[in-house]
């Protein structure tokens, strides 16, 4: 069966992408940011996921203000980089996993989460910057990706609690997929930042660090945070952190923190990053391969439910 082996959260600051694309990653300002992701890239090489689910937000690149889906699941075979105003980023096209994506859509919608199914979509820095941070700058991305776009741009975004519960439904969906796949789920965005208005430039490291602690030890507490608290404490764009809770809901309750990084600033934001592993689930494909005959019965069980 498929399983979620680990979860990764990271900010998705567009200027990080611009630094990479324009050969500026060696500058001291950017070195401070990128050095924090060196252990993460090594970790990712070892984790070798078969598929990643990346929870991110679109910044009016794929969706205009005409249509703003709350949760949009990318079910296409590929997702080209979007033109964000100065041309598409020079990153490889993101390959999808239409079979697993369709299975997740079916499972979570029947579980009463009314996702939007997206069969054609471009992806912006919200998705591609965390991929660069975790995979570097390869010619081709090493694994397929299922994008899950969340509205955090137009009020009202989904609540922290709803996001956590969607994560739980995603875990159930992945665990009922019969193929033996190791899945890593990303939550992206944040941490504290406010891009415009009188509070532009706001950073609240105390709030961010407490949020990182909560991700590791007490995520249920974080699900009680209201929109107004995120905005007051972490700035208007700090609301992006609700997406981290989709990742956390998809992880096991006893997931273990294996890495954390925090630095201020990168552009207007605090960069936060955490990696959680599900105990006993990293690697271990041989073990689940031995159980393959039983796994084959899963679709029949699902249909009978
Ligand atoms: C910035 C950060 C973001 O998350 C974003 O989507 C756009 C801009 C910034 O810090 O400049
Ligand atoms: Fe953003």
Image (cartoon, rainbow, N blue to C red):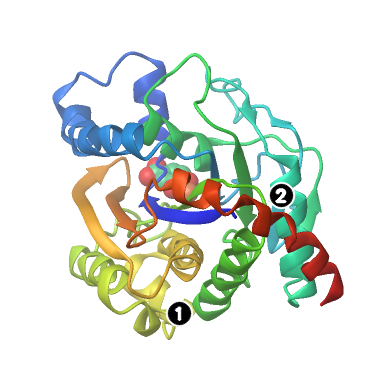
Looking at the rendered structure, which numbered label has been put on residue 101?
Answer: 2
Looking at the rendered structure, which numbered label has been put on residue 172?
Answer: none
Looking at the rendering, which quadrant does residue 196 occupy? bottom left
Q: Where is residue 240 shown, x and y percent of the image?
A: 47, 60
Q: Where is residue 255 shown, x and y percent of the image?
A: 33, 67
Task: From the viewer's perspective, tell me whether residue 81 is left or right of residue 8.
Answer: right
Q: Nearer the viewer, residue 11 or 140?
A: 140
Mark positioned earlier in the residue sequence (2 or 1): 2
Residue 74 seen by the camera: no
Q: Which residue is rendered at x = 16% and y = 34% of the image?
A: 32
Crowd around label 2: few <14 · some 14–19 · many ≥20 (10 Å): many
Q: Secondary structure at mark 1?
A: helix
| Quadrant showing the C terminus | bottom right
Of the residues tagged 2 and 1, which is closer to the observer? Answer: 2
Q: Which residue is rendered at x = 26% and y = 65% of the image?
A: 212
Crowd around label 1: few <14 · some 14–19 · many ≥20 (10 Å): few
Q: Does any atom of ligand 2 lie closer than 8 Å to the CB of label 1?
A: no
Name above or below for residue 87 compared with residue 270. above
Q: Which residue is rendered at x = 30% and y = 33% of the image?
A: 41
Residue highlighted by disc 1: 228
| Quadrant showing the N terminus | bottom right
Label 2 to label 1: alpha-carbon separation: 32 Å
Q: Where is residue 239 shown, x and y percent of the image?
A: 46, 65
Name above or below for residue 217 compared with residue 203. below
Name above or below for residue 23 compared with residue 262. above
Q: Secondary structure at mark 2?
A: helix
Q: Nearer the viewer, residue 88 or 221?
A: 221
């Amino acid at each position: 069966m498929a399983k979620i082996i680990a979860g990764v959260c990271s900010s998705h600051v567009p200027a990080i992408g611009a630094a990479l694309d324009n050969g500026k990653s060696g500058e001291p300002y950017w070195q401070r940011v990128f050095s924090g992701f060196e252990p993460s890239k090594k970790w990712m090489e070892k984790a070798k996921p078969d598929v990643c689910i990346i929870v991110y937000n679109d910044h009016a690149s794929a969706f205009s203000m005409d249509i703003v889906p709350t949760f949009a699941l990318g079910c296409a075979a590929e997702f080209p980089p979007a033109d964000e105003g100065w041309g598409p980023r020079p990153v490889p096209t993101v390959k999808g996993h239409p079979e697993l994506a369709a299975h997740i859509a079916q499972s979570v919608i029947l579980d009463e989460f009314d996702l939007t199914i997206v069969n054609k979509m471009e992806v912006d820095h919200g998705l591609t910057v965390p991929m660069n941070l975790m995979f570097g700058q390869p010619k081709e991305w090493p694994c397929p990706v299922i994008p899950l776009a969340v509205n955090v741009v137009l009020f009202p975004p989904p609540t922290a609690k709803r996001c956590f519960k969607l994560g739980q439904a995603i875990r159930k969906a992945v665990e009922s997929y019969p193929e033996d796949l190791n899945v890593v789920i990303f939550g992206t965005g944040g941490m504290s930042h406010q891009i415009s208005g009188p509070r532009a430039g706001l950073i609240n490291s105390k709030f961010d660090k407490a949020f990182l602690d909560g991700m590791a030890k007490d995520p249920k507490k974080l699900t009680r945070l209201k929109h107004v608290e995120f905005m007051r404490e972490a700035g208007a764009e700090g609301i992006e952190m609700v997406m981290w809770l989709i990742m956390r809901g998809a992880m096991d309750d006893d997931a273990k923190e294996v890495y954390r990084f925090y630095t201020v600033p990168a552009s207007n934001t605090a960069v936060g990053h955490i990696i959680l592993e599900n105990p006993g689930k990293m690697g271990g494909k041989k073990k689940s391969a031995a159980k393959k005959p039983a796994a084959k019965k899963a679709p029949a069980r699902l249909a009978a439910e």
